[in-house]
Amino acid sequence: MRSRTVIFYSLPAMVIAIPTLPIYVILPQLYGSELGLGLSVTGLVLLVARLFDTITDPIIGLASDNFGIKGNKRKPWIGAGALISGVGLFMLLVPNDGVGALYLLGWSIFLYCGWTMVAVPYLAWGAELSSIYTERTRITAWRESLSLVGFIGAGGVIAVSASSGLENREAIKVLVIGAFVIGVPAFLGLLMVVKEKSSEKFEENFSGFKISDVWKSLKQNRVFIRLLMAWFFNGLANGIPAALFFLFLEFRLGATETEKAVLILVYFVSAVLFIPAWRKLSDQYGKHKMWSWAMLIASGVFILVPLIPDGALVLFGIICVITGAALGADLILPPALQADVVGYGKFKFGKSHAGLLFSFWGLSTKFALALSVGLALPGVEYAGFNPKSVTPEGVFALALIYAVVPAVLKLVAVTLVWNFPLTAKKVQVVELAIARRECLRTTE
């Protein structure tokens, strides 16, 4: 595949990542505190909006699999979603004073709907760009690398804005403007340069569509269910330390705000830097094996975290480098495996259902993150950690839940994926069989 195609496909991932930080981290403070809505009301409104967000994933997945315009089934949804997201992003992050709960709820749902219309078809399209085992890893490596660049860049803009004296709302406005400036050409390039390669027929209306056939093929796709379970357990393993990260840094390591920011930067920069290595190793030894080794490395290092002395920031920084490197594998290899699963589904059931499969992929991610917060915070409190009355036993319990529980969850994921059946040779056989079947259909 030409590098031009891969780059133009991957660039929107950077744009999609830019608003992540303000939406998930800064938005609650903006509406709850600065705009006077109250933290409880803001939290409840955002919870309702995110529950609605989970409903839209499979709907958009099915729609982008089965309904399109003029031979395109991904582009129309992405184009419409990008426009909706742009409007929603501006209205939500650049509000006027005096807005209320209904304003926050309405525009949050509007934005989440637009994001889903972009994200699900976009990921599915990436799986359809190539039928070659190693090329699929190349595509995900570019996409996830640029996504991390966008996330890190957004964090840098917020940090620089704060240090230069800009107010929080002004810094957010800078990010929104930046997202528009980069996003418009990025999405236009995607829609104009990258061609859809799926040979599957789809409906331009609702005739001929049977949900029962789709559901039956989904239930029978055991390879997909196995990979999805591994993805979920690994997502839970990543979500728990994310939920407890700042508590651990403050109460176990005594980190300052600047030191916290540096450690986060080290973690994500390590992920970006090690992505090329994971891609090369996976091409040689297999995606599932290298993902398994990455999870084993992360588990082996993380399980030592409770033994770190208080205040050992340098030692923890080394752990951030290693676990950040493992994150690089988490980001690029599972979606590349999912692309192989899409091809397998097309071989076995006659249609890939890529949009639907990636919608469940997104649902699994959202559910894992929500459950990790729901388990981690009450879990450390039940184990004896109280930030208002800190004891050595409580801090040690925090460290155990922060590190050991995720390590065990990653081991569960490894058992599911270690002998994953879709190796490079089997994927090649599957794709040749699909090509042969389609050739026969065209000659009939």
Image (cartoon, grey):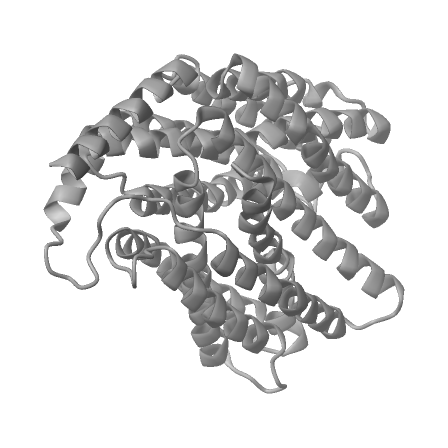
- Position of residue 75 in the picture relative to residue 401 (left or right): left
Q: Is residue 222 above or below residue 118?
A: above
Residue drawn at x 48%, y 71% as measured from the top left: 83
Q: Nearer the viewer, residue 97 or 438?
A: 438
- Position of residue 410 in the picture relative to residue 344 (left or right): right
Residue drawn at x 36%, y 21% as measured from the top left: 427
Q: Is residue 66 above or below residue 175?
A: above
Quadrant in the picture for residue 175: bottom right
Question: Where's residue 250, x and y in %?
Answer: 76, 41
* Residue 413 seen by the camera: yes
Residue drawn at x 40%, y 59% as measured from the top left: 75
- Position of residue 172 in the picture relative to residue 213 (left or right): right
Question: Where's residue 132, x and y in %?
Answer: 43, 28
* Residue 44 seen by the camera: no
- Position of residue 162 in the picture relative to residue 280 (left or right): right
Question: Where's residue 214, x and y in %?
Answer: 17, 43
Question: Where's residue 300, x and y in %?
Answer: 63, 15
Q: Residue furthest front?
A: 443
Quadrant in the picture for residue 384: top right
Q: Nearer the viewer, residue 102 or 275?
A: 275
Figure quadrant of the C terminus = top left
Q: Nearer the viewer, residue 180 or 370?
A: 180
Q: Residue furthest right?
A: 164
Q: Nearer the viewer, residue 76 or 94?
A: 76
Q: Is residue 213 above or below residue 81?
A: above
Q: What is the total number of numbered labels drawn onto the structure image?
A: 0
Residue drawn at x 51%, y 18% as measured from the top left: 292
